[in-house]
């Protein structure tokens, strides 16, 4: 038995050298979303299991085999959310936000799926998601996609391709479904086990299969785009025209059906070939039936979710981030009364400017020991406070990175001295 308790498989620690990339993504996303007048919503991580069964669909990978479901102490069946849309729709209905109102919302946070962990696929992973309610499109579908394209530009991410499809109306899908089932039945010997099962329960999902052995069969399957209703066709044409006008390139992929049941009309994914098999970084579409399905009044809706881990991995490869979390100054204190005076002085400096990163020596030690720590901290300056400095109400400033005379600076002047001599931001 191992002595150390380890993290749950597929659930990662995000260490200090990675968090700057997470923050870059999160801060940029928020800034871009605000430029489109979105508002943030925060939702529970745990929901009733039925919510996911009813929204995502019983015959999906998520509900069939990936959910973290447990009974709480009252015997209620609860589930760690595997995605954010269901909870967002639930929360909006419950709080009256979809009632005759338009909402443009975003959220971020952890999601949980019991999948086989591998690069880009984890059991606790994180998404940033967006959901719009009350807008029928296709103008808003285009703007939603433009917003994602802007986010990649702002982040400096390259080599992302947009894949686009439309699933049509619910009725058009039913008609297409019959054709698809007939085709798959003719080729039943080529179906894998999952697809055999889905043939009767959820045949469209066969198109979403990741099994390489199934790909040729899928490529040759009847094309959904040829079985569209007129309204969906017109909407899709207009969406494409708006994206053309915005200079956004896309590839129409008739096999893009998305993993969840609730989509209709527009579906899209941003994919890259730089992450191996886990190449989808952002996926979304329209789900006009979902609010009604959960008991709200019929409300058109659309949204997307992006995988933070996959985007962070791209950022680490593609974006040079000058991360400097080192303190600006290291406060060296030795002698009677210097701890108290030093801690107070550091507080005064932070009162003046919280951008100043000050590390006060902690745990005593000789000047020599403290200078070693100061050097290791990466600080540019050491502020030295001994009994003599206290008597004169000053500190001695020593540059740790370049040859320069030591200076004596009065306490009253120290704040502005540091502001002028350090690169604060
Ligand atoms: P995939 O086809 O890769 O399994 P999905 O269709 O199940 O993805 P969605 O439910 O649409 O994914 O989630 C949106 C995004 O969240 C994905 O495109 C991906 O970037 C990210 N994502 C989904 N599942 C995971 C996971 N297990 N680990 C890390 N990121 C994930
Ligand atoms: Mg999946």
Image: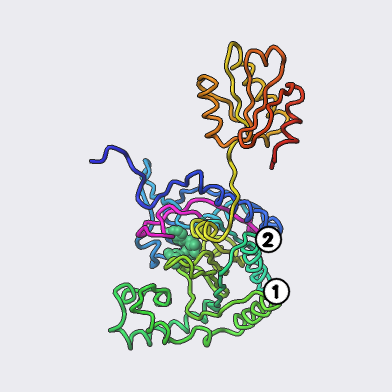
Q: Are marks 2 and 1 in contact (CB under 8 Å)?
A: no
The residues colored magenta run 97-126
Q: Residue 52: in sight, yes or no?
A: no
Residue 128 shown in magenta? no
Q: Which mark is residue 102?
A: 2
425 in relation to 280, above or below: above
Residue under pointer 1: 246
- Residue 376 picture location, percent across and down: 52, 34
Q: Residue 373: in sight, yes or no?
A: yes
- Residue 201 picture location, percent across and down: 37, 74
- Residue 228 picture location, percent across and down: 55, 84
Distance from disc 2 to disc 1, alpha carbons, whole Å, reads 24 Å
Q: On the rendered image, what quadrant is the N terminus found in?
A: top left
* Residue neighbourhood size for the residue with mark 2, other residues' Cα within 10 Å, grouped as few (<14), some (14–19), many (≥20): some
Which structural element holds mark 1?
loop
Which structural element holds mark 2?
loop
Q: Which residue: 32% across, 72% down?
A: 194
């Amino acid at each position: 038995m191992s002595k150390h308790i380890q993290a749950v498989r597929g659930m990662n620690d995000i260490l200090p050298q990675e968090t700057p990339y997470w923050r870059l993504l999160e801060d940029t996303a928020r800034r871009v979303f605000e430029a489109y007048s979105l508002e943030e919503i925060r939702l529970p991580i745990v929901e009733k299991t039925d919510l996911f069964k009813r929204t995502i669909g019983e015959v999906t990978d998520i509900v069939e085999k990936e959910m973290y479901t447990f009974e709480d102490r009252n015997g209620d069946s609860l589930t760690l959310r595997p995605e954010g849309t269901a909870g967002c729709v639930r929360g909006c209905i419950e709080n009256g936000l979809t009632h005759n109102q338009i909402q443009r919302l975003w959220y971020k946070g952890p999601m949980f799926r019991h999948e086989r962990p591998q690069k880009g696929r984890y059991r606790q992973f994180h998404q940033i998601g967006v959901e719009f309610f009350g807008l029928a499109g296709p103008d808003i579908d285009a703007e939603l996609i433009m917003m994602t394209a802007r986010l990649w530009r702002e982040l400096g991410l390259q080599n992302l391709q947009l894949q686009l499809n439309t699933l049509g109306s619910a009725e058009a899908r039913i008609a297409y479904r019959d054709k698809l089932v007939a085709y798959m039945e003719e080729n039943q010997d080529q179906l894998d086990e999952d697809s055999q099962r889905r043939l009767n329960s959820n045949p469209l999902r066969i198109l979403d299969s990741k099994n390489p052995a199934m790909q040729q069969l899928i490529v040759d399957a009847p094309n959904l785009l040829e079985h569209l209703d007129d309204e969906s066709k017109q909407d899709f044409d207009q969406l494409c025209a708006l994206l053309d006008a915005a200079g956004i390139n896309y590839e129409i992929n008739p096999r893009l059906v998305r993993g969840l049941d609730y989509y209709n009309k527009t579906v899209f994914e941003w994919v890259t070939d730089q992450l191996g098999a886990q190449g989808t970084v952002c996926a979304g579409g329209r789900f006009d039936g979902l609010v009604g399905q959960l008991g709200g009044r019929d409300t058109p809706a659309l949204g997307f979710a992006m995988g933070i881990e996959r985007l962070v991995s791209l950022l680490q490869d593609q974006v040079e981030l000058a991360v400097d979390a080192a303190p600006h100054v290291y406060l060296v204190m030795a002698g009677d009364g210097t701890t108290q005076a030093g801690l107070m002085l550091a507080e005064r400096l932070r009162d003046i400017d919280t951008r100043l990163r000050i590390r006060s020596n902690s745990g005593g030690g000789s000047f020599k020991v403290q200078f070693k720590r100061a050097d290791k901290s990466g600080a540019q300056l050491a502020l030295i406070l001994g009994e003599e400095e206290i008597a004169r109400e000053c500190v001695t400033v020593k540059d740790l990175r370049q040859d320069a005379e030591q200076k004596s600076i009065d306490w009253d002047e120290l704040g502005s001295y540091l502001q002028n001599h350090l690169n604060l931001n």
